[in-house]
Image (cartoon, rainbow, N blue to C red):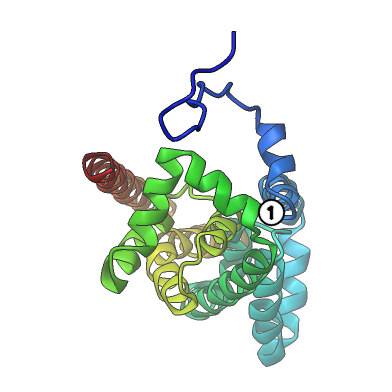
């Protein structure tokens, strides 16, 4: 059966079959393999780093002032290139330098990693990716919510995206670069959104390291209670952020359909 032809001579579009993830990856050009690597490499690298966290932390700590600079720079490069996840590197900062020095250094590394990831993503983004977004109403609604509603709204939405503990850093960098979110917005929102879970990772690692280092673990019960409460708070904040983001995107999608 041939498709019907409209008054203007264009064939009526037939429903397109759902494409597989692999087809999307191939169609996306350079951004496709980058997305795949952004999902796989940090997961593997995180296990490797955590397994070697004590000797690596000792090496960084032994280099005193230069050690924390090396840590922050390596954090930026390795997270920006999607080699290591932010949670494992934040834990390394807490283990090596404690909460007071480890948290600022980890945040510097995170912002640097976001900048590197954003630059790489913007170079990898192609017309194919933008066409794929346009073909999918849900994706288009997310892009519109991110970049077509004003700077403050974009800043708030990117912060919400970054807040949940399970938000993948490297993959989110790629998504923000592909959708052309402004660099300054990405950096500010990344620092704000990742601060709670980064502080949690640094705090837990520094506390555990202190317990291992002490001959008589001091106030172990108090540390466990505070750690559990901190985890709960971060998870609750992340859940609230996810719900808020879902409502905003749903509202934008409905608005687009209404004006389409």
Q: Quadrant of residue 210?
A: bottom right
Left-right relation of 233 to 128? left
Q: Position of residue 141 (x, y in %)?
A: 37, 47
In the image, farthest residue toward the bottom = 65
SS under mark 1: helix
Q: Residues within 10 Å of mark 1 (few under 14, many from 20)?
A: many
187 or 94: nearer the viewer = 187
Residue 219 against residue 150 in the figure, above or below: above
Q: Position of residue 253 (x, y in %)?
A: 30, 42
192 or 223: nearer the viewer = 192
The residue indicated by pointer 1 is 31
The reply to whether residue 232 is in sight is yes
Q: Residue at left 65%, top 83%?
A: 68
Left-right relation of 142 to 110? left
Q: Quadrant of residue 196?
A: bottom left
185 or 98: nearer the viewer = 185
Quadrant where the N terminus sits is: top right
Quadrant where the C terminus sits is: top left
The reply to whether residue 222 is in sight is no
Left-right relation of 244 to 148? left
Q: Position of residue 92 (x, y in %)?
A: 63, 65
Q: Residue at left 70%, top 48%?
A: 32
Left-right relation of 197 to 80? left
Residue 225 against residue 137 in the figure, above or below: below
Residue 178 against residue 183 in the figure, above or below: above
Q: Residue at left 74%, top 41%?
A: 26
Q: Position of residue 170 (x, y in %)?
A: 61, 57
């Amino acid at each position: 059966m041939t498709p019907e032809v409209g008054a203007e001579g264009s064939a009526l579009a037939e429903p397109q079959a759902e494409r597989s993830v692999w087809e999307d990856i191939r169609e996306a050009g350079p951004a496709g393999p980058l997305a795949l690597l952004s999902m796989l490499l940090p997961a593997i690298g995180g296990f490797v780093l955590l397994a070697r966290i004590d000797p690596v932390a000792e090496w960084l700590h032994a280099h005193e002032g230069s050690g924390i600079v090396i840590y922050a720079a390596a954090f930026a490069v390795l997270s920006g290139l999607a080699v290591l996840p932010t949670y494992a590197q934040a834990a390394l900062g807490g283990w090596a330098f404690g909460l007071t020095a480890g948290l600022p250094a980890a945040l510097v590394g995170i912002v640097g990693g976001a900048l590197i990831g954003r630059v790489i993503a913007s170079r990898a983004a192609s017309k194919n990716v933008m066409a794929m977004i346009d073909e999918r109403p849900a994706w288009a609604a997310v892009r519109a919510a991110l970049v077509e509603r004003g700077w403050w709204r974009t800043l708030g939405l990117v912060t919400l995206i970054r807040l949940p503990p399970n938000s993948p850093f490297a993959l989110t960098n790629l998504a923000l670069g592909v959708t052309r979110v402004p660099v300054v917005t990405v950096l500010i929102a990344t620092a704000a959104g990742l601060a709670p879970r980064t502080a949690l990772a640094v705090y837990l690692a520094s506390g555990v390291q202190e317990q291992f280092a002490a001959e008589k673990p001091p106030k172990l019960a108090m540390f466990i209670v505070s750690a559990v409460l901190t985890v709960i708070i971060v998870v609750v904040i992340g859940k609230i952020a996810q719900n808020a983001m879902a409502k905003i995107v749903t509202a934008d999608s409905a608005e687009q359909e209404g004006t389409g």
